[in-house]
Amino acid sequence: MLARRGVVTLLLLSFSVFCGAGEDQLTPLLASALNGNTQVFPGTDGRQHVVYELIMINANTTPATLQKVEVVPAAYPTRAIATYQGGELLAHLRSTANTAVANPEIELNGVRVFLIHLALPAGPPAPERLVHHLTLLGGVTPSPKPQTPVALEYLAAPLTLSANVPKIGPPLKGKDWVAFNGCCEVSGAHRPTSQPVNGGLYFAQRFAIDWMRLDEAGRLVNGDPADVHRWVSYDSDVLAVADGRVVKTAQNLDDQTPGSLPDPKTITLANVDGNYIVLDLGNRVFAFYAHLRRNSISVSPGEHVKRGQVLAKLGNTGNTSAPHLHFHLMDGTSTLGSNGIPYVIDTFEYAGEVSAAKLASGNMEGTWNDALMRPPSVRHGQFPLDRAVVHF
């Protein structure tokens, strides 16, 4: 909670401006949520999670230097749920090309993306609406030349929260499936990846998971890692997570040799996902399965499928360095030109997490089950977070 009287007064005043009452205030740094609403979902850590992005634009000739971003409930704008400043603020601030930025200064007409992940306690319900308290140095004079920046703070970027997330079945079957590259940290492989597609900026992979399986000895690969057949997950059955209709398929690509990603010069929008399936689950929810084995897809566009039906085999096609199933839900049929949406899996067993330090080493060989829970705990209606090990 903010303690200084002057700050509280300005914050409350700016909130009245935000609501359409009181005097107008110049707000040179514009901010808005990329999506006006998002969903709250429970994770395997027992907390409620919210993941979204802000778009920020400096509309003044004087550079705007962002100093602090606070997420606050719209109903209680002096109570910060999360605060980003210093190095953490900079870590969450990105260019529209998904690159890190050197400093928090935003030039005239400059655009930045601010990545947010809230992890809220499980008990009380999340607020229905959020706003964002911005603290910055910026210009308030409509001058054609840069002026001396002044200290500013105000509220911007309203966001509506909903707990209405899709509930699905598992995309795979069996024990010891690991959720690699999962939600929700900004350092992850999927979370920060934005794509400028079809005239818009999209985060299709916000909630994507790369599923890989351990064998009974806790290994991802048993034998030569350059041999695709030695990976435990390879050729596993891929399942429909709900009743639905097949929208798109592609299956003419061969497996990559594991060990490294393909030459970036060879990757296009057409082949980045490898062989894939898109299912329409209804209510503007689409399931996406990528990197499938060539000629293993057993369904065709227009065909209706049932939950649990085998759709294809797990492979290593497209932009991938080892066999895995890339899976996510999205709000459209375009695999990159859609926004990822959260979900929960109705029932599974949670066996803990694999080592973050081992994952950071980049060595996928050896054993990964040293710290797993025995026996696992039964979970209902949760989202498997990054590095979670689950039994379906």
Image (spheres, rainbow, N blue to C red):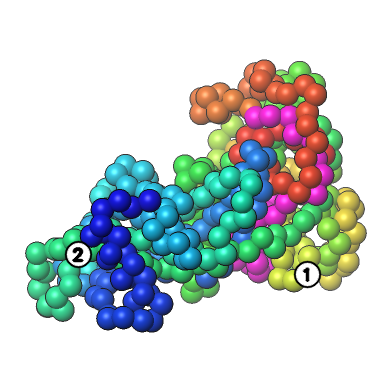
Can residue 341 be spotted in the picture?
no
Q: Main secondary structure of the magenta part?
A: strand
Residue range in magenta is: 326-353
Mark 2 or mark 1, whichever is nearer to me: 2
- Which residue occupies the foreground of this view, 26 or 146? 26
- In the drawing, does residue 87 fall left or right of residue 347? left
Residue denoted by label 2:
138
Residue lying furthest front:
5
Residue 104: horizontal and vertical position, in percent?
Answer: 27, 53
Query: Which residue is located at x 59 percent, y 25 percent?
Result: 355
Residue at 45% over, 62% down: 76
Asked if residue 226 is positioned above or below residue 34 in the image, the reply reads: above
Locate residue 1, reporting x and y percent.
38, 51
Picture quadrant where residue 367 is located: top right
Type of amino acid under label 2 = Gly
Judging by the rendered image, the residue that carries numbered circle 1 is: 282
The residue depicted at 69 percent of the width and 50 percent of the height is: 327
Q: Secondary structure at mark 2?
A: strand
In the foreground, 370 or 336 = 370
Spatial distance from mark 2 to mark 1, Cα to Cα? 46 Å
Task: Kindly identify the amino acid type of the residue bearing the numbered disc 1.
Answer: Gly
Is residue 346 magenta-colored?
Answer: yes
Mark 2 closeness class: few <14, some 14–19, many ≥20 residues within 10 Å: many
